[in-house]
Image: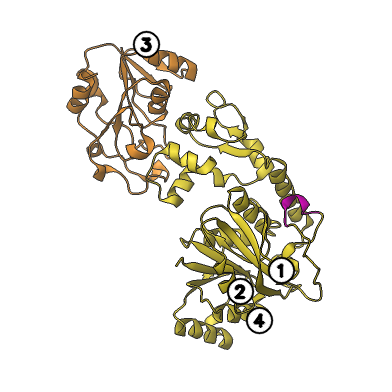
Amino acid sequence: MSKVLCSVATRGRYFTTLPLVLNAIINQTKPVDKLIVFDDNDEPQDMRKELIYSYFFQMLDAKKIAWEWRFAEKKGQHHIHQHANMEGFEWVWRVDDDAVPEPNVLETLYSHVDESVGAVGGSVLTPPYLPDTGAVTGLIDNIDKEPNIQWGNIYVTKQVEHLHCTFLYRAGVCDYNLSLSRVAHREETLFTYSLHRKGYQVLVVPNAITWHMKNPQGGIRSETKQEMYEHDEQIFRNVLKYRDHTIVVLSSGLGDHIVFSHVLPDVRNPLVFTCYPEVIQGRPISEAIQLFGDIEGHNIYRKMDQWKWQDSLENAYRKMYL
Amino acid sequence: MIIISPYAQKLRNGKQNPKNYPYWEELISLIDEPIVQIGIEGEKQLVPDFRTNLPISALRELLWQCRTWIGVDSFFQHLGWDEGVKGIVLWGPSDPLIFGHPENINLLKDRSCLVNNQFLWWEATEHRNDRFVEPKEVIEHLKNF
């Protein structure tokens, strides 16, 4: 059975919704293999001194669930999720610090996992707003026209193209877009859409309800700068605009370009950004940064390091772009 | 004519690139045919015919004029492979199974000479002469071309 990491990114919610979330995670019918709480508070506290938290930690120990309280970098939750994504687990169940899952959620989500699945989400209900999402498609093209499918009760399993808030996902396959601002607007949409683009099924499933106790304080709602949302929205729109292309960013050496030139003919509808146009024609790297923000996900050396790669550089490029 | 491409990219910290072969002078002294060195301005000149800052197209043409080439783990070993001109690559701390091409002759002294993490900046790796094969071994392979 695959190992599941549960990651919780928290900010400003020590004494409101976070304890409810942790209690819900501890009491899942399918226990997680490890829980990491990423503490992104501006002034982090030692929660071992808090009575309720000390009980939580003892409950985790008693249930033999590994846990870690990790102080985060204060760059936003997308950076936190990327850390969780690369922890070496096959699956990550990401739970927001104001989203309280019912006890069967992980068990239900996990029951839908197979080799073809990239992510599974359930309902994320925020009463009193409970729209009927029975006819919602969950397709990226309809993102401006319909409510998110997870906002309502889900009665049948459905394949969609993006998820939000909280879900179980296949780790280490796609990266979070780290160029988003601290508000990380659209981060989960971009991430789950990238899993869909990679060829994995993204599913919403019934009988997996999480109660979203939206809290006006804490989380990304601590940030109010409109320009951050606009910045992130622009990146999201550019990803959609160029989605029919395979975006290739070669911010690497001359030799790497030469090797990649043997891969390029097999890349589907490539849009190439290059350092050496005399080897591979394309647009300048600066344009890629302007359009998509983060290009670190295209760093083939970082990827090979993550993959503990032992095959050829050419095959690493093939894994990345084919 | 033989092309030599003796140096890998300069490091940002000014230290010697750990992929640079340390015995070029001795190796060159054992080669009894014309040698063209390619590289960039500022690199140490090892033979009279040193051609610097050639564009890729000129390097490709030069490859077709040579009997073979000898280089280190730099862009040139990829260029030779790309042109289908077989050469000898002198490996040190980087892994020919990852960065090399089986079409070339890849001379690695021992896999114990490789650094553990192949994907970090080379600035973090010290240059060590004992990672590389001796010139006599290179000459034996050169004779077999």
Q: Is residue A182 above or below residue A237?
A: below
Residue bearing the label numbered 1: A154
The subunit letter for the residue under badge 2 reads A
Quarter of the view holding residue A222? bottom right
Mark 1: secondary structure: loop
Quarter of the view holding residue B65? top left
Q: Is residue A49 left or right of residue B12?
A: right
Task: Please name the residue shown 77% across and 58% down the image.
Answer: A225
Q: Nearer the viewer, residue B91 or A134?
A: A134
Bounds of the magenta segment: A138-144
Q: Is residue A176 left or right of residue B49?
A: right
Percent position (x, y) of residue B119?
41, 45
Q: In orange, which chain?
A: B
Could you tell me how far apart the alpha carbons at marks 3 and 4 are, in whole angstroms?
Answer: 75 Å
* Magenta stretch contains residue A186: no
Mark 4: secondary structure: loop
The subunit letter for the residue under badge 4 reads A
Contact between marks 2 and 1 (CB within 8 A): the answer is no
Q: Amino acid at mark 1?
A: Ile
Chain A: give its colour. Answer: yellow
Contact between marks 3 and 4 (CB within 8 A): the answer is no
Question: Of discs 2 and 1, which sits in the foreground?
Answer: 1
Q: Amino acid at mark 4?
A: Phe
Could you tell me how far apart the alpha carbons at marks 1 and 4 are, in whole angstroms?
Answer: 31 Å
The subunit letter for the residue under badge 1 reads A
Tag on residue B65? Answer: 3
Tag on residue A15? Answer: 4
Tag on residue A105? Answer: 2
